[in-house]
Image (spheres, rainbow, N blue to C red):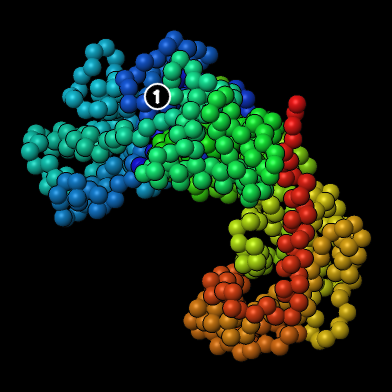
């Protein structure tokens, strides 16, 4: 499908006169903020933009709490490359100068690859030609065109004259006319279509005969998938997809879904037990409605209001992953869930309120996300993590451990859903790996277990010979975790990299560093030291990535690796057992 790349809003409901940009957009996008700051208005405007209809605003669609009601304006983004322009205008020379014209003056600081077209609402009768946006009540803004044209260098002017030689006039006016013609030709189309899943969701009969995706009439649509004609392979595939999602949510691969011939419900068959979906609990009911709706809808922009309502954090993450991996839509989601904000899947925008109206800004850095959590009123102790937390030294260990888990259980355990991996590197690492133990810092690390009782830690032994005693800080960590049911994995060899067979590590080293001269390391030697690699410094992350790409089922697990991986999987399974929803009859 064609994605909506981005849009801007001004003069609509809670939005003031200054254009607020929502872009660049990805497949899954979150609009996050407190209640009553304008999150839902972002979704409403996206629906207006993608409706394909002429602007029809009611009185309350105009800003009412601002000193002066501004003009309704909007912006739409598209990606434009040199090749696009060369193909569109049949030019072979200097197309990059044409792109520069629209980029340098029309793009706010959102993304250099996006070209923004700015529109204003047409006042009075429709005029300005037969363009699709004009028919819908929008006209391309002309403010700043003359200034833009006056600032064009000789290369841009020459490119414009080659592209649009038919325009005549004085040098300044013809440049402005040609610039306007270029911008008009680059207007994005309005082919993206939109659907909405409202905040109130409940399976029931159709309302007024309309197709809705909040649960109303959903059973009728699911019935078509449950009992398709022999030639309707797509319907059969979608039904299997929905069934697999429910099996994943309930962690039971034997579940069967049935749509009864009568009644407006979905039956869940689990062994000898058959229960209506609503009897499994509100959270399961809600998440299945949203996943089913997103599966039935095809190649649309879907606006979802507060999907987190009634959903456990694990269900929130599973839903987001399903939307991203198993459906072909684009999503714009209004939420105030910190658990969704913490996802690596979505592009996030922070909505806030100011005296000038709603403000929207992209959340790009970890600090941006931290500010969002503070704005939502969350403290660090409030944020529920995945059910198991695994602490490792750094990013390379995370790569190895994720690979070993996937190799053992395929996709059954998912990082971010069933477990999280955290890093204890940096200053704290120094205290875990040297004799200079800072008791206060060690106490603080041990107290991290309060954030999640299901805590595991993977530590390099740093042993340089067999039987060498661990340092005092590592011994204390081991005693604390083992005494309270945690899991600790101390490598048998010097470091995690010693688990990698020598020939495989050598191949990965040469792929990551062309000048590497690998030599096999013993069990109690650092395999990434200069003496073993010929390098002053080694990128452990690059080596890890190259290693796991080559590590298939034929590669042996050395020393105690297999034992520790099995123990880690058992630990994660145990931590998640309590969160698996159970089938229950509410009578």
In the structure shown, which secondary structural element does the residue marked by tag 1 occupy? helix
Residue at the image position 9 percent from the left and 34 percent from the top: 169
Q: Residues within 10 Å of mark 1 (few under 14, many from 20)?
A: some
For residue 245, side relative to residue 463 (left or right): left
Total tally of numbered discs in the picture? 1
- The residue sitting at 59% across, 78% down in the picture is 554
Residue 383, position as x, y percentages in the image: 73, 42
Q: Position of residue 242 (x, y in %)?
A: 53, 42
- Say above or below: 273 vs 450: above
**Whole-percent x, y for residue 71 in the image:** 38, 18
Residue at image coords 75%, 85%: 524
Q: Quarter of the image containing the C terminus?
A: top right
Which residue is depicted at the point 29% across and 31% down? 144
| Towards the viewer: 420 or 25 | 420
Left or right: where does residue 303 sit relative to residue 518?
A: left
Q: Give 497 or 77, whichever is nearer the viewer.
A: 497
Image quarter of the N terminus: top left
| Rendered view: 418 above or below 432 | above
Name the side, left or right, on which 363 lies relative to 374.
left
Q: Which residue is mark 1?
A: 48
Instruction: Tell me where residue 453 appears, x and y as whole percent.
Output: 83, 51
Vertical placement of residue 53 versus 559, above or below = above
Determine the image quadrant of residue 521: bottom right
- State the residue in front, 377 or 427: 377
The image quadrant that residue 46 belongs to is top left
Is residue 147 among what the camera can see?
no
Question: Looking at the image, can residue 423 be seen?
Answer: yes
């Amino acid at each position: 499908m064609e994605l909506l790349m981005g849009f801007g809003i001004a003069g609509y409901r809670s939005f003031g006169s200054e254009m607020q940009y929502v872009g660049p957009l990805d497949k899954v996008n979150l609009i996050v903020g407190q209640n009553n700051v304008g999150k839902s208005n972002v979704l409403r405007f996206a629906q207006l933009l993608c409706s394909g209809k002429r602007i029809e605003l009611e009185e309350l669609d105009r800003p009412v709490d601002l000193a002066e009601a501004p003009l309704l304006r909007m912006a739409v983004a598209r990606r434009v490359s040199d090749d696009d322009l060369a193909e569109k205008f049949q030019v072979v020379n200097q197309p990059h100068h044409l792109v520069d014209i629209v980029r340098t003056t029309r793009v706010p600081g959102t993304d250099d690859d996006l070209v923004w077209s700015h529109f204003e609402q047409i006042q009075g009768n429709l005029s300005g030609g037969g363009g699709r946006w004009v028919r819908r009540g929008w006209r391309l803004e002309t403010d700043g065109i003359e200034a833009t044209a006056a600032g064009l260098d000789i290369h841009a002017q020459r490119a414009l004259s080659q592209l649009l030689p038919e325009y005549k006039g004085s040098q300044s006016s013809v440049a402005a006319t040609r610039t306007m013609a270029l911008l008009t030709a680059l207007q994005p189309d309005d082919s993206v279509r939109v659907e909405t899943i409202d905040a109130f969701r409940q399976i029931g009969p159709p309302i007024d005969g309309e197709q809705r995706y909040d649960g109303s009439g959903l059973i009728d649509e699911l019935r078509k998938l449950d009992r398709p004609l022999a030639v309707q392979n797509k319907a059969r595939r979608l039904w299997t997809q929905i069934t697999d999602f429910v099996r994943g949510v309930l962690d039971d691969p034997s579940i069967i879904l049935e749509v009864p011939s009568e009644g407006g419900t979905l039956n869940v068959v689990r062994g000898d037990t058959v229960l209506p979906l609503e009897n499994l609990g509100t959270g399961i009911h809600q998440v299945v409605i949203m996943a089913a709706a997103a599966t039935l809808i095809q190649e649309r922009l879907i606006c979802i209001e507060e999907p987190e309502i009634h959903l456990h954090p694990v269900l929130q993450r599973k839903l987001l992953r399903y939307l991203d991996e198993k459906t072909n839509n684009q999503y714009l989601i209004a939420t105030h869930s910190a658990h969704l904000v913490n996802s690596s899947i979505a592009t996030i925008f922070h909505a806030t309120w100011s005296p000038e109206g709603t403000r929207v800004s992209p959340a790009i850095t970890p600090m941006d996300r931290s500010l969002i959590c503070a704005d939502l009123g969350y403290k660090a102790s409030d944020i529920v993590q995945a059910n198991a937390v695994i602490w490792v030294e750094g990013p390379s260990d995370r790569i190895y451990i994720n690979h070993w888990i996937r190799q053992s259980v395929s996709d059954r355990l998912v990082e971010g859903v069933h477990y999280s991996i955290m890093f204890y590197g940096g200053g704290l690492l120094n205290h875990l790996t040297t004799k200079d133990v800072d008791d206060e810092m060690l106490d603080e690390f041990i107290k991290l277990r309060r954030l999640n009782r299901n805590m595991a830690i993977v530590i390099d032994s740093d042993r340089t010979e067999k039987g060498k005693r661990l340092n005092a800080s590592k011994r204390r960590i081991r005693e604390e975790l083992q005494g309270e049911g945690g899991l600790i994995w101390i490598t048998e060899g010097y470091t995690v990299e010693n688990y990698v067979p020598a020939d495989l590590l050598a191949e990965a080293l040469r792929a990551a560093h062309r000048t590497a001269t690998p030599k096999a390391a013993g069990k109690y030697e650092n395999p990434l030291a200069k003496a073993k690699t010929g390098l002053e410094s080694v990128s452990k992350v690059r080596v890890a990535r190259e290693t796991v790409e080559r590590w298939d089922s034929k590669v042996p697990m050395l020393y105690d690796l297999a034992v520790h991986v099995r123990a880690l999987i058992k630990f994660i399974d145990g931590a998640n057992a309590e969160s698996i929803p159970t089938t229950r009859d509410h009578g």
